Image (spheres, helix red, strand yellow):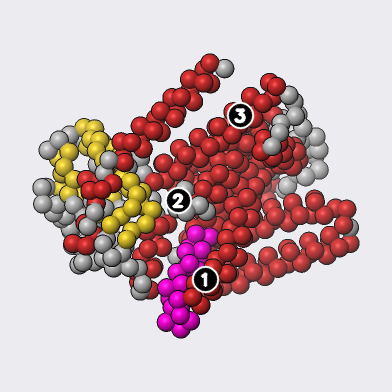
């Protein structure tokens, strides 16, 4: 109990620390965008977003990770509303460098840290000289040294937020069992979801005897994906599950659990399929080995592509407000956009849940195949 | 150019497949409404597998 109390204070402390550390840079960016009319930084160029190219760039920018957190940009003044995030770099020569991303002025300035200069260029951080020169080779590849980037980016912040939400919700659920075995209110809904994961996902796929060992993983992955997907639908604009690195990491967990928990039968079915004639066994082995890798690959791609597609469709429909303004007047185009994006938004709510369900379901299916005992080995 | 044609073909194929899955599941549920839950789960799994294939092809082909 005490430990839980302490750990929660610690987590909240870290979160507040990060937020306060980064909040300081907010007002410095005022008016910066207005100087940059050359369009070097296409998204935050001066003036409101109103052409098709600017909308495309805006959507593309949203789908990517960012080193600062911008809620919106005032097109007239070029002022960004939001806060900056800490940049943490490991430079082979200069060692660890920590500074606020406000030093980059949204990619428009060269940041200086302990006498080293870094430039933000197309979403990546390069080491440069004081003027921020970027050197290219013949193929237009950047030649500058790239320090290792451990920064707390927007996606990292989103993941930490989702982690905190899941942690707080389930801690309150766990504590409520001390008082009574029937949780009330929101907690009842949570319990329902936990039971759903157990009875509809884990037990049918893994089996009654062995499912308990994997419930921790399956529940974690289910609720993490669910909360991250739902966070992506808030105006905060997180797109964590739409980042292929995140989904790859989740898929790798499933991959390693499947391989390490796989029993003799599982490996036998991969390398020497029982019941098949010998030439068939030889043909099947490479296919099955390939299958080991395509399963987590499809897990990774499915979640990533679904969330990316959902976000871009939603943003494109919102952009109709701007694109159709000349044909239907401002009121008409906004009406069309609201109706269509509301419709897609409701579908996205379903998809947010469905993708969490599908990921957990397929994970438990793969794990189940690897751990199940076969009582009928002879007639495959 | 060719990858756009390929993307179109993938989407056509995935569409036919999803239509088949959905249609057959509907038929199954209509015949045996008491098995609706099981049919739905199986339908979603197959749908997800097919979707993964289609998305994989789209991303690899891009």
Chain under disc 2: A
Q: Is residue B14 left or right of residue A318?
A: right
Asked if badges 1 and 3 are on one and the same chain, I answer: yes
Q: How many marks?
A: 3
* Mark toward the start of the polypeptide (1 vs 3): 3
Chain under disc 3: A
Q: Is residue A245 above or below residue A332?
A: above
Give residue A236's mark. 2
* Mark toward the start of the polypeptide (2 vs 1): 2
**Mark 3, secondary structure of its residue:** helix
**Hey, which quadrant is residue A148 in on the image?**
top left
Can you see residue A323?
A: yes
User: The C terminus of chain A appears in which quarter of the rendering?
Assistant: top right
How packed mark 3 is, by other alpha carbons closer than 10 Å (few <14, some 14-19, many 20 or more), is few
Q: Position of residue A321 (x, y in %)?
A: 46, 72
Give residue A337's mark. 1
Give residue A150's mark. none
Q: Is residue A323 above or below residue A101?
A: below
Residue span colored magenta:
A309-330
Report, in whole angstroms, how far the alpha carbon at label 3 lies from the one at label 2: 25 Å
Q: Position of residue A57 (x, y in %)?
A: 36, 65
């Amino acid at each position: 109990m005490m430990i839980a109390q302490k750990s929660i204070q610690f987590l909240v402390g870290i979160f507040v620390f990060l937020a306060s550390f980064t909040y300081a840079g907010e007002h410095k960016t005022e008016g910066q965008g207005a100087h940059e009319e050359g369009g070097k930084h296409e998204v935050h160029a001066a003036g409101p977003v109103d052409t098709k190219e600017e909308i495309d760039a805006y959507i593309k920018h949203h789908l990517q990770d960012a080193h600062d957190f911008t809620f919106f940009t005032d097109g007239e003044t070029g002022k960004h509303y939001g806060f900056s995030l800490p940049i943490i770099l490991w430079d082979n020569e200069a060692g660890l460098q920590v500074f606020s991303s406000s030093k980059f002025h949204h990619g428009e300035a060269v940041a200086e840290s302990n006498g080293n200069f870094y430039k933000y260029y197309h979403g990546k951080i390069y080491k440069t000289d004081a003027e921020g020169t970027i050197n290219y080779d013949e193929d237009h590849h950047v030649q500058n040294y790239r320090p290792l980037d451990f920064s707390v980016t927007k996606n990292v912040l989103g993941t930490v937020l989702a982690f905190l939400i899941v942690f707080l919700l389930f801690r309150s659920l766990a504590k409520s069992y001390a008082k009574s075995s029937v949780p009330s209110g929101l907690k009842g809904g949570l319990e329902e979801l936990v039971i759903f994961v157990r009875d509809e996902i884990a037990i049918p796929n893994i089996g009654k005897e062995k499912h308990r060992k994997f419930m921790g993983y399956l529940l974690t992955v289910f609720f993490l994906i669910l909360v991250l997907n739902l966070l992506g639908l808030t105006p905060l604009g997180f797109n964590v599950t739409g980042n292929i690195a995140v989904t790859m990491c989740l898929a790798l967990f499933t991959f390693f659990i499947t391989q390490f928990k796989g029993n003799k039968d599982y490996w036998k079915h991969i390398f020497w399929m029982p019941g098949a004639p010998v030439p068939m066994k030889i043909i099947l082995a490479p296919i099955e080995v390939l299958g080991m890798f395509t399963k987590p690959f499809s897990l990774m791609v499915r979640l990533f592509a679904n969330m990316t597609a959902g976000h871009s469709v939603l943003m494109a429909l919102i952009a109709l407000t701007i694109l159709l303004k000349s044909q239907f007047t401002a009121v008409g185009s906004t009406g069309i956009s609201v109706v269509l994006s509301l419709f897609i938004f409701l579908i996205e709510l379903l998809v947010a849940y469905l993708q969490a369900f599908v990921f957990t379901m397929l994970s438990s299916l793969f794990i189940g195949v690897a751990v199940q005992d076969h009582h009928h080995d002879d007639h495959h | 150019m060719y990858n756009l044609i390929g993307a179109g073909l993938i989407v056509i194929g995935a569409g036919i497949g999803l239509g088949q899955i959905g249609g057959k599941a509907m038929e199954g549920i209509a015949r045996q409404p008491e098995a609706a839950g099981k049919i739905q789960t199986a339908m979603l799994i197959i749908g997800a597998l097919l979707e993964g294939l289609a998305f994989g092809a789209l991303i690899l082909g891009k």
